[in-house]
Amino acid sequence: MSTPTFDASPFADASHRPPTSQPQIEALSFSGRGGEYFRIWIVNLLLTIVTLGIYSAWAKVRRTRYFYDNTSVAGSSFEYHGNPIAILKGRIIAVVMIAAYNIAFRISPIVGLITMAILLAVMPWLIWKSYQFKLYNSSYRGIRFGFRGSVGQSYLNYLLLPILSGLSLGLLAPLVHQRTKKYLHSESKFGATHFSFNAGVGAFYKTYLLSFGIALLGYIVIFALFGSTLVVLFSDLKHGGSAVFGSIGLMMFSLYAWTFFIVPLFLTMIQNLIWSGTKLGEHQFHSKMKWSKMTFIMITNLIGIALTLGLFTPFAHIRAMKYRIESIDLTTSGSLDHFLADAEAQGSAASEGMADLLDFDLSL
């Protein structure tokens, strides 16, 4: 996917509802179809191969516009205005950075470490510019989104905190995750109206610990079920060699299968936490993804991709994206008609002269 990097909020349509100040629920919908997207996907893939990757920037624009055009709320869809040339610049920079990293370590470890330090120092700035590009080039009903976060905050969230998380052996990972999401969501805006993010660090730790606990419990049960059998078989390896390898294989399969159940659990809880903790002005988002359905989609997608040697990939993207988008809705507060008018009046003036400044996308 590359998928739209930002799910914008819905707005009311006065022609379809009476004026009211009562809260209303606006649901996002996704109308993309696997067959349509397959044609875009296969052409993008072939042209990217033929052009040695150069067309990938245009492929991203086509792909992103398809997902935006098919994501709608209150009768209107979103729009993407990204410039392929700007995206190509970002991808060239990314390739140069990766090449420099690999070549530097072949020259000497010292040169490699210096190159790594330079890349780490530049990365938060690139992420900051990429956020600006992606949001500024997204719009709804002609009103642009924007990003007001500072580069200093980007260095804090994408350099200092990850380093501290590494030094803590991952104990600070939920904190880093919360800070990066808070940075993106609370510093984003639609026209003149800002988003806010109120999911706390404690909620992230709870999600991580719950996922880890359930995963660990499953792994313990699997090892307990197969452990005693393996001990018996190993004690008589001469007569039970094939049985040992069969039991090991079945145990490894069980471990992988359990992992495929845990991953959608974590993704479901994280999406629900992040979007249920996000507001646009006074309007509250809600995400209601279910673990069972997300697990079914991910496993059947994996089977479909494997059986078709990858040709099911675009259908898998559509299925996953449709469920994730349509799991999100917005509880409005007051009239959205006035909100939309205010956002348009102030937002269009604020966006003047920004195109040249934001003409860059890292596109990793």
Image (cartoon, grey):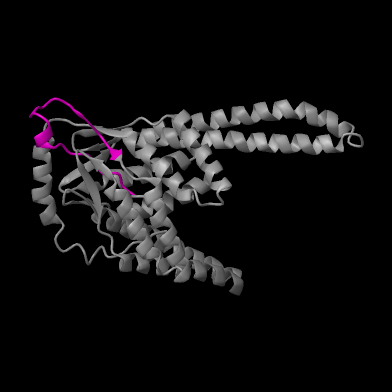
Chief secondary structure of the magenta portion: loop
- Image label count: 0
39 displayed left or right of 225: left
Residue located at (67% from left, 37% from top): 253
Q: Residue at x 47, y 42 (%)?
A: 173
Residue ID at (52%, 38%): 300
Residue 252: where, in percent of width, then height? 69, 38
Give the position of the C terminus as an image quadrant.
Answer: bottom left
- Relative side of 290 to 262, left or right: left
Q: Is residue 238 above or below residue 118?
A: above
Q: Is residue 52 among the parts visible in the rendering?
A: no
Which residue shows up at 38% across the image and 40% down it? 178
Q: Quadrant of the rendered structure where residue 250 is?
A: top right
Q: Is residue 328 above or below residue 40?
A: above
Q: Is residue 218 or residue 77 the one in the foreground?
A: 77
- Was residue 13 drawn as part of the magenta stretch in this picture? yes
Closer to the camera in the image, 47 or 140: 47
Left or right side of 328 for 45: right
Asked if residue 89 shows in the view, the reply is: yes
Residue at the far right in the pictured view? 238
Q: Residue furthest bottom?
A: 107
Residue 361 is left or right of residue 305, and the answer is left
Q: Residue 155 placed where, x, y %?
A: 37, 55
Q: Position of residue 118 (x, y in %)?
A: 45, 66
Image coordinates for residue 238, horizontal then vertical, percent? 92, 37
The residue stretch that appears in magenta = 5-29
User: Magenta segment: does it hold 341?
Assistant: no
